[in-house]
Amino acid sequence: MKWRNLHKAIFCATLGVSLTTPALAETLEDVMKARGLTDKDLLAAAKTYVPTGKRDEFIAFSSGGQSGQVIVYGIPSMRLLKYIAVFTPEPWQGYGYDEESKAVLAQGRIQGKDITYGDTHHPAISETNGEYDGRYLFINDKANPRIALIDLHDFETKQIVVNPVFKSSHGGAFVSENTDYIIESAQYPTPYENTYVPLEQFNEKYRGGMTYWRFNREKGRIEPENAFTVMAPPYSQDLSDFGKGPSADWSFTNSFCSERYVGGIERGRPPFEAGCSAKDTDFLHVVNWRKAAAVVKAGKTVTINNHKVITMETAVAEGILFLIPEPKSPHGVDVSPDGKYIIVAGKLDTHTSVYSFEKIQKLIADGKFEGKDPYGIPIIAMQDALHTQVEVGLGPLHTQYGARPCEAFTSLYVDSMVARWDYCEGKLLDRISIHYNIGHLMAMQGDTKKPAGKYLVALNKLAIDRFNPVGPLHPQNHQLIDISGDKMELLYDMPLPLGEPHYVVAIDANKLKPIIRYNSGWDSRADKESPYKTRAGREKTEKSPGKVEVFGTVIRSHITPEIIEVEEGDDVTLHFTNLERAQDETHGFALYGQNVNLSLEPGKTVSFRFMADKPGVYPYYCTEFCSALHLEMQGYLLVKPKGDKTVTDTTVTDKVEGSYTKANYEAQVKQNEATQATIDQVVAFITSRNYQDFPPVVALVEDATDQLNFAKEAKAKAEDFAAKEDWHHAALWATQWWQYQVKAADIGLRAKGHLEQGGAKEVK
Ligand code: CUK
Ligand code: CUA
């Protein structure tokens, strides 16, 4: 019995339940036995389980690797929350299907070609004073050197910028401590111009570099016209990081092939991997970006592909660029939270190297260099700049920081471990095995001035046997590790079924304040009011020869217009505005055979354009189960053959529906009156409470009021027809009046529930 009580105590203590909770039919002991769970499992479960209706403490934004998307999940539950469409079309969000988002994707064209995927590596949250501010997210595309901007007020991609001089880029996106700039360094050296240059001219004509994209926070956009690049030798630049605090004006980028080796096994040469790891060291690039920006302002640049470039000669003359040797095949470069140290991990070295920013500054000020590289760039001696080196294990890659002073965590690819160590004292503290072959690792806010500690996520390259098999292509495995105690503890495995994520960033959930609906008639992709915004009752169709433009709306449970008639060969554009104000009342729009799926979140306006090139009948419908009458949220696009002169006779379709009688009408009116009585009760409840203090309820009330106004209009129409003794139309409109009442009641009840749960007070 002691055994059982122990488990109960652990379970109750960790979940905060009182021991006097009445016994459940099934005991914890039974479940543990049946499922083969240990004490450790139980603790891990209690630490990660987020009960129904509760939320996570941190929100993680993960690169989606080759999927070209961003994956959002909660920590510690590891529950998936969203995929954000970035470089790749995504139908659920209408991304790449509505004209507004097609325009965003079109910004990412490379030399006129549509690129419909991205290889995303490094997400970065915007910072203010070196801390995440939760406003924007940036992410790079390695394959096509691009940076995307996601606005975290609605989690949508707003902008894509294409690097004008690189042909691949890896060391982005990382932000300066006030997000003045986003860095993107080159990876594979190429000529800056978009021309052919033979590989024999590699040393002379191929170049690497670091691009600094200016970010305008007021506009919430990257300004390509104010971006610049610091040219660098063809050393295959890799990861980058900006300084913080004392080092805030500087950035650091490493490189993995300072051998400048060009492979070509088919030419009888040893391959790239042999030539690029021949030397014992590569180069850490140390750049004074603040000075570089001033040099750009002073006009000391050359223009290549319409983009400002600081040449290596200028960079050297102005004291902008320095090199420091770093151990064999380095990968991550990560600046410590206090900004005093730069930690580099060399994949083929067992150490992490801690460089002292203070020492580097002194050496630069004293002009103490060990020599120059072939391009005349001063080289600082490694031993002079090092603070310490720590033996952490095999294959160190990336470093993150914890909440304790001097606490660092480094991923060990070859050892399949995470090392916890002290970068001030230079000593190893703890190690934990992961499964298998870790790439990046991520601690909560672990690359900012204020790491939050608590948890760490290992981004493992291989899953092998960790999950139920799903064929040769395996999911990725993000493993959650508890770092709150002195010993690291593995808590959870999460399969990620979308691309190979490289890096993740996680922010305190309280720092994110996304909206729940758009201002009515909003073009979310451009973040401004849409010129196609349409109000209720103002829907219209404009026709001119060869052209049809529809200004429609959607609201539970109909699409207006319900019938669209065009002629074969017409150029058709549909604009729809979602009139809903209620939270989560999204409608979709799908149309047969035109490759379209639109997502209309409350308030949003989107457009879709296509050629009606084939006569026929094209049903359309709402793709979100939005109400009990969702299936009826439908319509027909009729493409008439060219020259068809048939006149539409509505009386024919009316007859198809059958005929209604006076008795039908009266029965419906009776039901409507009863429904109205219920609505009046709900309204009385809401208005007797301080509902104005609850913004979501205010939105619901506005929405319900809309529906009641529609009901009033339908009622008037029904009564008109009744007066004319047209019982058929009177009954139909009475039914529609009831439909609006039902929706109003539904919304009203939701508002009432919200007030009851929120503890609203009675007002006089
Ligand atoms: S990279 Cu993939 S594991 Cu692109 Cu930051 Cu290191
Ligand atoms: Cu709107 Cu279903």
Image (tube, rainbow, N blue to C red):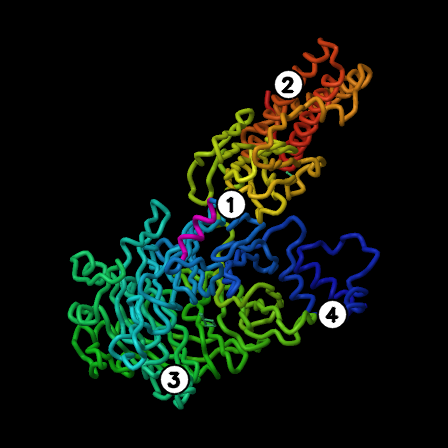
Residue range (magenta): 100-109
Q: Secondary structure at mark 2?
A: helix
* The CB of the residue at mark 3 lies under 8 Å from ligand 1: no
Q: Residue at x 74, y 56 (%)?
A: 19
Rounded to the nearest angstrom, the CA distance separating label 2 from label 3 is 77 Å
Q: Amino acid at mark 4?
A: Leu
Q: Nearer the viewer, mark 1 or mark 4?
A: 1
Q: Secondary structure at mark 1?
A: loop
Q: Amino acid at mark 2?
A: Lys
Of the image marks 2 and 3, the number of the one nearer the N terminus: 3
User: Which residue is disc 1 drawn over?
Assistant: 98
Q: Amino acid at mark 3?
A: Gly
Label number found at residue 263: 3
User: Which residue is disc 4 drawn over?
Assistant: 37
Residue 244 in view (yes/no): yes
Q: Is residue 103 magenta?
A: yes
Label number found at residue 712: 2
With respect to residue 41, does 549 lie above or below?
A: above
Rounded to the nearest angstrom, the CA distance separating label 2 from label 4 is 61 Å
Q: Quadrant of the C terminus?
A: top right
